[in-house]
Image (tube, rainbow, N blue to C red):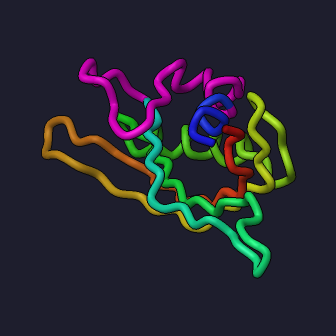
Amino acid sequence: MEEAIANLLLNNPAVAAIAGDRVNWSARPDDDALPAVTLHRISGAHDATMAGRSGLIASRVQIDAWGRTYREAKLLARAIVPALPHARTLTGGVVLQGIFIDTESDTFEGDDPEPLYRTRIDISVWHKEAEQ
């Protein structure tokens, strides 16, 4: 699932026009180039029935759109949301059953003269377990 979400963003023309290839899981690289996207898997719950595991996983993912200005971070966030398909999608061999936007918030970090602005988008992703 992680590679599939990253590829959706990396291969989206609107996101790529703003962030280029700066889409990373867990942390931004040390070069500090912005705007950029970081992704964090917050949780994942395996679905089960009385007959056993169904093969579906519900993951919560935090997507951070970073910029040197509020506008830069917000424009990147506005490109990210439509890049995440709501309907069932097959990407890179991974079946994403649905991606749902849960919440969005804005923050900043650091002090003047160079604060970093962030728009956080929390999503729920239903996906199939990886084949072993």
Is residue 27 shown left or right of residue 78? left
Quadrant position of the N terminus in the picture: top right
Q: In which quarter of the image is residue 83?
A: top right
Quadrant position of the C terminus in the picture: top right
Is residue 45 shown left or right of residue 54? left
Say which residue appears at 68% left-offset and 29% top-offset.
Answer: 14
Say which residue appears at 74% left-offset and 28% top-offset.
Answer: 92
Is residue 95 shown left or right of residue 6? right
How many numbered discs? 0
- Name the one closer to the observer, 100 or 48: 48
Residue 16 locus on image (x, y percent): 61, 23
Q: Does 93 sit above or below residue 116?
A: above
Residue range of the region highlighted in magenta in the rendering: 8-35
Q: Does 113 sit above or below residue 78?
A: above
Say which residue appears at 83% left-offset and 38% top-offset.
Answer: 90
- Name the one closer to the observer, 68 or 66: 66
Is residue 92 shown left or right of residue 45? right
Residue 9 locus on image (x, y percent): 63, 32
Query: Which residue ends up furthest to the bottom in the rendered image?
Result: 50
Residue 88 locus on image (x, y percent): 86, 50
Say which residue appears at 71% left-offset and 28% top-offset.
Answer: 12
Residue 96 is one of the magenta-drawn residues: no
Q: Quadrant of residue 18?
A: top right
Residue 85 locus on image (x, y percent): 78, 47
Residue 10 is one of the magenta-drawn residues: yes
- Name the one closer to the observer, 98 or 22: 98
